[in-house]
Amino acid sequence: MSDDVESAGKDKNEPIRYGPGLSGKLLLLTIVFVMVAEVLVFVPSVSNFRRQWLMARLEDAQIAALAAEAAPGGQLPKTLRDELLQSVKVKAVAVKRADSRRLILEEDMPAEIDASYDLRDATWLALIADALMVYAEPADRVIRVVGKPNFATGEFIEVVMEEAPLKAAMIGYGLDILGLSILISIITAALVYLTLDMLLVKPMTKLTWNMVRFSERPEDPTRIVTPSGRRDEIGTAERELAAMQAEIAGMLSQKNRLAALGLAVSKISHDLRNMLSSAQLLSDRLRSVKDERVQQLVPKLLASLDRAIRLCARTLDFGQAQETPPKRKHFELAPLVAEVGEGLGLPQPEHIEWISDIPAELKVDADRDQLFRVLSNLCRNAVQALESDADGIGEIVITARREGSVTLIDVRDTGPGVSERARAHLFQAFQSVARKGGTGLGLAIASELVNAHGGEIMLVSNEGGATFRVIIPDVVVELQRARRRSA
């Protein structure tokens, strides 16, 4: 669970390959950084230990020099002198006071001094470099050290000594520091690793594996991540991921539903087309009936059946989610509106009044069948709204006018209006359901057909009933193309 998935976005059939996990990387980096910190602590510590060790030798040498100077005549017996030098672990001691420099104690001096160190004005970088050189240089070196532990200004003490005791002391101190550093590193690395692993790595690993698991079956709502309730960036990522996965799952569910519905519509359209064709053949026989009223209704009945058959055929040819491009032409709008009213059985005496206020000469540039469907869906919704409102007599009013090259058609009813819930998803399939048992497809179909004409449909008023406006612009035809068509 702690490894990074390197095959995200690859073929599902390929084996999943794993690289170094976040936990392993975190552990390695923690150890490296802690060791770097320990090195940064170790080097100054060793440098300070060396300086303090040498200062201690200088202080002991100062005491020995004071004892030698207090002797009668300033001379000590050789035996006592050797004991003093051996006690302070030096070979010679010299003191500078006032303007004179005097050798107080000395043993058999070496022929050559390997290195000299002045502790009076040494910088910390020089002290660190000198301390590290102790480990690199041979142990049999003889060094000269200058300092002033308790001297006045201008006075100092210098000693000549073997470096082996210093090196042995520094090695012992280094081993002690190393052991302590390892212990501190282990404890620190463990605490840092466990804390970061719990706070960051495990939640991120959980998110990663949830995304991989969700990508395998995004339509399964049980695979949506459950936010932990954290209020930091991880919690924000969990909440945003959960919202995104829920939205994707909902969209896929709706898409599957639409696909299943489309298949069902195609099957229904196939059988319905056959039944409508049979009804059309039977309706043709009504032409032989001499009744005047029958002769008036037969053309309208045949036109409605023919329109329904064409719609079924288009559904089978192009699929349920795609409309054919509009076949536009100029025609008078008033007769089309009259057909819409007759098809819906309007007016309904004592319940719904039907008012068509359209100039007889008004023409529109549109696909006649598609505009019929648009107005039929809008008026059918108005009828259903008025039927659900049993208070008195309602009315449906259709008006139209021209504004330049645009035709505006208003469909108004005196019903209860569009609910706030339906307005939030107006013109969206299965979303703008305004009544129980509705599908919300009517407005979605109307919007799609109007948009195909380059027009617009909108709810312009919702007070005292709903008023929908359909805007259909004329087609802009290139002059040369129009002349060729006329020719």
Image: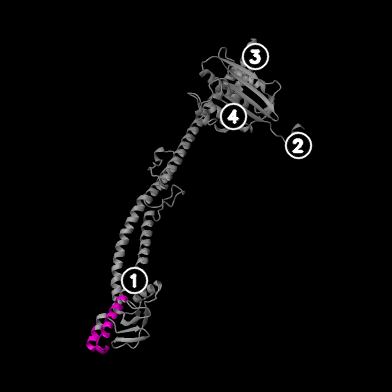
Q: Secondary structure at mark 1?
A: helix
In the image, the segment drawn in magenta is 55-83
Q: Earlier in the sequence, mark 1 or mark 3?
A: 1
> Which mark lies nearer to you, 4 or 1?
1
> Which mark lies nearer to you, 1 or 3?
1
Please tell me whether residue 486 belongs to the stretch shown in magenta: no
Question: Where residue 296 is drawn, which disc sits there?
Answer: 3
The amino acid at mark 2 is Gln
The crowd level at tag 3 (other Cα within 10 Å; few <14, some 14-19, many 20+) is: few
Q: In the drawing, does residue 296 fall left or right of residue 115?
A: right
The residue that disc 4 covers is 458
The residue that disc 2 covers is 480
At 27% from the left edge and 85% from the top edge, which residue is drawn?
69
The amino acid at mark 1 is Asn
Q: In the drawing, does residue 441 fall left or right of residue 288?
A: left
Number of labels in the image equals 4
The residues tagged by marks 4 and 2 sit, at their Cα atoms, a distance apart of: 35 Å
Q: Nearer the viewer, residue 113 or 447?
A: 113
> Which mark lies nearer to you, 4 or 3?
4
The residues tagged by marks 1 and 3 sit, at their Cα atoms, a distance apart of: 117 Å
In the rendered image, the vertical position of residue 47 relative to residue 102, given as above or below = above
Q: Secondary structure at mark 4?
A: strand
Q: Earlier in the sequence, mark 2 or mark 3?
A: 3
The residues tagged by marks 1 and 2 sit, at their Cα atoms, a distance apart of: 98 Å
